[in-house]
Amino acid sequence: MAAPVSSCPPYLGRRFLMLFDFDETIINFSSDDAVIHAAPGGTIPDHLKESFCPGHYNENMQRVLAYMAEQGVCEDAIRSAIEVIPATPGITALFTFLLSHMQDFECAVISDANMYFIETWLQKAGVHQLFSEIFTNPASFDKDGRLVLQPHHSHRCLQCPNNMCKQVILRDYLARRVRQRGRPFQRVFYIGDGANDICPTLALGERDMVFPRRNFPMHSIIQKMKKEQPGMLKPAVVPWTSGEYVVDFLKKAVEER
């Protein structure tokens, strides 16, 4: 589900699109893991841990949130657990740069976390207004106080979890913005860390740039792709450890006319 969240005017003149993953990219932790700190004893039963299946994060988190509701964990406790997650090193500097160049950059989040976690954190950090849209799994509290999580969409990509393919989201977003703007963005920048950030990068072109977090799965997979499938990934690849390093490349892009 996409949510238009920015109160700023939709400047049609913005030249660049900046896309962010959330967990371990904007924040320096997994929000799904962080919220468990609000559970009784700061943990969940072994049967819930053992029920996890790779590629089925959404289903697993639905079970975890149901358990937490049964244990009486309230919204305030969940919100507090999310709000205290630290930002990834240098991300605050990256946000500061983008906020000062909103005439040039349109920003969006594409994440397999959920809307409640992402909006809660961005609002606490004071950067919610930076993002025009958030693409993630819908989440809201029901009448019983349970945070109910739903899949973002269905798709046919065999490489991605069944609840979300980031490439499908990115392609649809770019096509829609071309229709609205009358022209494509000059360049697209994508910053992420995980294996599910590989698929959307395959939709990018030679003028675009991908920032995989150094020594995280996205970085390792790209290194392997370059060796085994040269030419498959078209955008420039810039590994990063701090958001401040990303700023240096964005500054160069702004200066180019």
Image (cartoon, rainbow, N blue to C red):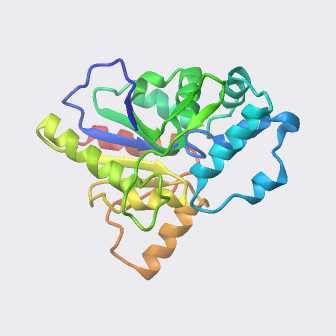
Q: Where is residue 229 in the image (x, y as percent from the top left)?
A: 40, 79
Q: Which residue is drawn at 16% across and 35% down?
A: 180
Picture layout, residue 162 above or below residue 29: below
Q: Which residue is drawn at 76% across and 28% down?
A: 73
Left or right for 40, reference 167: right
Q: Where is residue 5 in the image (x, y as percent from the top left)?
A: 40, 25
Is residue 34 visible in the rendered structure shown here? no
Picture layout, residue 190 above or below residue 202: above
Is residue 135 visible in the rendered structure shown here? yes
Q: Where is residue 204 in the image (x, y as percent from the top left)?
A: 30, 57
Seen as rendered, the residue at the extreme bottom is 228
Seen as rendered, the residue at the extreme left is 182
**Closest to the observer: 224 or 54?**
54
Left or right for 39, reference 159: right
Q: Which residue is drawn at 31% across and 54% down?
A: 208
Left or right for 37, reference 95: right
Seen as rendered, the residue at the extreme front is 144
Q: Residue at x 28, y 44 (%)?
A: 173
Q: Quadrant of the C terminus?
A: top left
Left or right for 214, reference 20: right
**Closest to the observer: 68 or 218?**
68
**Closest to the observer: 123 or 149?**
149
* Total numbered labels: 0
Q: Quadrant location of residue 99?
A: top left
